Amino acid sequence: MRAAVTSAVGGPIEISDVPDAERRSGEILVRVMAASVNRLDRMVFERGAGMGRDAVFPLIQGIDAAGVIESGSGAMTTGLRVVMKPSIACRRCRWCRANRAADCVDAKTFGIDRQGGFAELISVPRSNLIKLPDEVSFVSGAAAAHTHAVVLRMIRSAGELPPDPVTMVTGAGGALGTAAVQIAAALGHRVISVASSDTKLLATRDLGALVGLNRVTGDLVNDIGVTTDGAGVDLVIETTGAAEVISEAYASLGRGGTLVLVAAAPGVRLELDALDVYRSRHRIIGSANSNLTDFTDVYRMLTIDGIEPVVAQRFGLEQAAEAMEAVLDRDRIGKVVIDMGDGE
Ligand SMILES: NC(=O)c1ccc[n+]([C@@H]2O[C@H](COP(=O)([O-])OP(=O)(O)OC[C@H]3O[C@@H](n4cnc5c(N)ncnc54)[C@H](OP(=O)(O)O)[C@@H]3O)[C@@H](O)[C@H]2O)c1
Ligand SMILES: [Zn+2]
């Protein structure tokens, strides 16, 4: 099969003929039609590690994939259109037993712990596959597999929200940010998008954001005060991981507001006034990964709510190295996808 093989940390990524992926016991062989390139893929490429674990090179990367079952069995019949959940829960740890597979302590991830989606074929545990709705293209299916499902978990992790919640999304033009604007808007939130350029903000307005705030040309905390008549926001999904943005996000919370942290560079600190946290009933939570229910529900939302993941750039498998570079483009809006099919 053709595959993009990352030969060592930092590359090069070589497109080569390698032995076909073998169907492992209890697994299903999938012909990949599309796979997206995520920040996590980039992290593995640059540092040789992701999710706290070292990857072994040479490695076929790609944490997600959508495709067609090559050789199936039972309900997973040959020819069925499917999408694969990027992380494989251990099903044994305390969190898995508490139905919180997103918090599994021993999850394995495609493209880190085993072969990923940047290849024509991949073997996937049956429990990691769901049917891709007919209305959802392979490209959209792959684009949503990581980002949209983790966003739904982030919002659900925030627990009870007041009616018509005001939700702020930082880094709103990014892969996670565009997904967060779409999912929150579809759930009926009043979305405020925050980004560093008006072009990105304009794009997020099309995705359902009611207001866009430029944090470079404006004063974010002040602008949030004006926009919400001093009430602040109920929920922040903070996707930049930048210290300054995290501080501004916390300062933008209203009474009972929840800050969801999903990204941060090592050593990033947030200073808090403990008295303010409890008097204002603030909550700060960390969220990553998704449960299988989030994953399945997202594909239902894509269909019912007509959500179309934003794809910034598509590449063929032969251009996997360029796709890995495209993730670094700060002006990019949405996701980078490797399209191995006919675009459908
Ligand atoms: N917890 C999880 O489950 C989970 C899942 C997916 C991703 N993540 C993490 O979430 C973060 C965002 O992922 P993503 O895929 O949305 O990335 P992305 O597409 O590159 O978007 C990141 C956004 O952050 C902003 N940003 C601020 N400071 C930046 C900087 N120094 N360098 C680059 N961008 C900066 C940029 O927006 P502006 O220029 O407009 O500010 C950019 O659009 C990454 O750290 C990723 O690892 C976490
Ligand atoms: Zn587990």
Image (spheres, grey):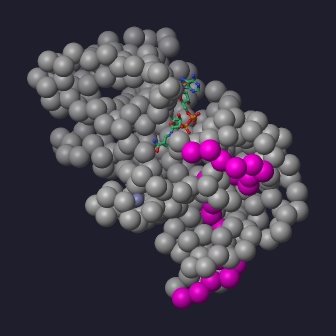
Relative height, residue 65 to residue 193 (above, below): below
- What residue do we see at 74% from left, 52% from top? 59
* Residue 74 falls in image quadrant: bottom right
Of the 4 image quadrants, the one containing the N terminus is bottom right
Query: x, y (%) of residue 238?
Result: 41, 31
Query: x, y (%) of residue 68?
Result: 66, 73
- What residue do we see at 53% from left, 21% from top? 196
Residue 59 is a magenta residue: yes
**Relative to residue 273, is residue 224 drawn left or right?**
right
Query: x, y (%) of residue 85?
Result: 52, 61
Of the 4 image quadrants, the one containing the C terminus is bottom right
Relative height, residue 317 to residue 69 (above, below): above
Query: x, y (%) of residue 328?
Result: 68, 31
Q: Which residues are magenta?
A: 53-74
Residue 14: tell me if it is visible: yes
The residue furthest right is 17
- What residue do we see at 31% from left, 64% from top? 97
Q: Dividing the image into four equal quarters, which quarter contains ligand 1?
A: top right
Relative height, residue 177 to residue 249 (above, below): below
Relative height, residue 68 to residue 254 (above, below): below
Residue 195: tell me if it is visible: no
Residue 66 is a magenta residue: yes
